[in-house]
Amino acid sequence: MEHRTACRKMKHLKKMMTCCAVETSAIQTYVQYKVGAILLNFLPQWRSIDQSNRIQRGIALTWRDQDSVHNLEVLKRKTAFKEDQEAHSSLSKIIQQELEDDVISQVPDSFLKCWNQIFAISKKNGGWRKIIDCQILNSQLQTEYFMLKGITDIQEIIMPNDWATTIDLHQAFHRIREAEELQPYPCFSFYGLSYSCKGMPYGVSKTPRTFIKCLQLIIAETMKRCSSRIFVYVDDILILDQVLTILQHEIQQVMKIYSQSRFRRQSGY
C-alpha cells in the first residue's frame, strides 16, 4: 500500500512539472573582462538604476564587537590541505582559473589577518567546487537577518503541466567587489601559497544579503517585463510557464536583462 502511494505521488510530481532543456544562446557579444569585481567596469548601467554606490562599495564588514579584530589575530593559524590527490588536482585547476579570472590574487602571508580552511566537494553533474570555510571569520561578524525565499515558496507557484527551466548565473558573487578593508580576511592557503579574494567571496555570511541588495532592482525589472512565473533564489533563476513557446521567449528576455548588467549563465545550463 505504501509503495503504491509513493508511486502515485511520483507520477503526480512528474505530471506537475515537465522540465525542458532549452538552448540559451549568447544574447550579445562584448569585450571579455575579468570576472573579479567586473561590475565596476559598468557603473553607468548601474547608475541608471541607482545602484552604482552599492556596486562601488561592494561587500563590507560589520564586526560583532570591538574585540573581533583582535580575536581573529589570536585565532589566525595557517592550515594544511589534507584531502586526497583527486581533490588536490581539482583545486589546483580551480585556483589557477580563478587567478586568470582575477577572482583571487596571490598575496604574502603578512597581508593576511585570517586564514580560512579550503576543501573541495564533487558536483552532481561532474567536476569539483572549491569551498572556503569562513566559520571563524563569520563568528566575529554581526549577524544580519534578511528574508530569503525557499522551497516552500517554489511549491506555491508551481502548477500542473508546467514547463520549466533554470538559469544559473556564472560566478555571480565574484562579480561584485570586495571592500579593501575586507580583503585580508577571507583568505586561504594552498600548498604553501596564500591567496586573497578580489571579488565578493562565497562563504562569508554577509555575501548572500549583499548580492540580493545589489540585484533587487534587476529582479524587479525582470518580474515587470516577463509574464511567466519567475522565482529567484540568490544566483539561480527558475522560470515556469504553461506554454513552451512563451517560456522560450521569456528565457531570452531574462538572459538579455542579466547580460546587460554583465551576468551570464553557467555553462551547461
Image: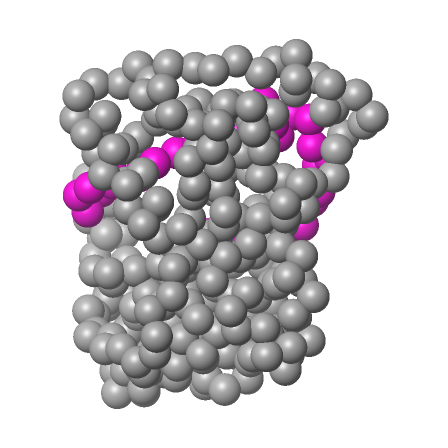
Q: Which residues are magenta?
A: 123-152
Task: Confirm whether the magenta stretch covers residue 143.
Answer: yes
Image height of 255 relative to 104, above or below: below
Q: Is residue 78 visible?
A: yes
> Quadrant location of residue 140?
top right
Q: Is residue 69 above or below residue 216?
A: above
| 56 relative to 233 in the view: left or right | right
Which residue does the image show at 66% across and 12% down from the upper left?
74
* Left or right side of 99 for 186: right
Between 28 and 166, the residue placed more toward the observer is 28
Quadrant location, the N terminus: top left
264 sits to left or right of 67 = left
Picture quadrant where residue 104 is located: top left
Residue 152 visible in the shown view: no
Structure colour scheme:
one colour
Task: Examine the image and state in which quarter residue 161 appears.
Answer: bottom left
In this view, the residue in front, 169 or 152, is 169
Q: Residue 138: percent from the left, percent from the top?
A: 62, 30
Residue 115, x across and y down, in percent: 51, 23
- Identify which residue is drawn at 47% across, 33% down: 107
Identify the residue shown where x is 69% and y is 32%: 141
Figure label count: 0
Answer above or below: position of 201 versus 220: above
Q: Position of residue 88 (x, y in %)?
A: 23, 25
